[in-house]
Amino acid sequence: SLVLGPLSSPGRVLGTGAFVLGPRLALAAPLGSARCAAGGARDSCGDDEVSRAEQAAADRERNLDDAPETIFDKIIRKEIPSKVVHEDDRALAFRDVSPQAPVHILVIPKVRDGLTQLSNAREDQEALLGHLMLVASRLGKAECPEGFRVVINDGKHGAQSVYHLHVHVIGGRQMSWPPG
């Protein structure tokens, strides 16, 4: 998982796997991942999600957007039911089928356009990325007035299991730190 945090040097990918979004905002790898990487018990490191992410990364060894469609494409087309909480011309937000907290919403772009993961974002997608964050903010504020967490998983080590960018809005309880 990736967690929002302050960093600098927009557009730069740091050696830690962090991706800098702007002069005061970046996505950084969670501190808890170091514990798992250092040999923490696999069961305590999200074994199922990590296994799915490893498989998805292995399947993903191809071009940016020639990968097969994902479950999210079927949800967008309403072929698979979901509990939609927001929809507009650019974004769809729905409740996660495997919630990790009382509130767990996924916000996705309705058109993937190469945005299989955050690290593939292009400059021409800046407005869409901002829109996804604004939707996440509004939903988090409405459903979790005492606070919430926004998470974006990116790649194998980020435990990304679905290669269609998605923003997790998680809350409804006290979150712990470090995440992961």
Image: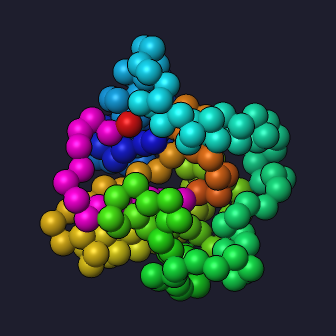
Taking 66 as reference, is 15 above or below it?
above
Taking 166 as reference, is 32 above or below it?
above
**Residue 67 locus on image (x, y percent):** 81, 52
Residue occupying image coordinates x 30% and y 43%: 5
Residue 177 located left or right of residue 81: left
Residue 22 located left or right of residue 155: left
Residue occupying image coordinates x 47% and y 29%: 43
Outermost residue on the bottom side: it is 88
Q: Is residue 91 visible?
A: yes
Q: Is residue 115 visible?
A: no
Q: Main secondary structure of the magenta part?
A: loop
Residue 169 part of the magenta-drawn span: yes
Taking 116 as reference, is 104 above or below it?
below
The foreground one among 125 and 113 is 113
**Residue 36 locus on image (x, y percent):** 43, 23
Residue occupying image coordinates x 71% and y 42%: 56
Residue 87 located left or right of residue 169: right
Residue occupying image coordinates x 23% and y 43%: 176
Q: How is the image coloured?
A: rainbow
The foreground one among 24 and 85 is 85
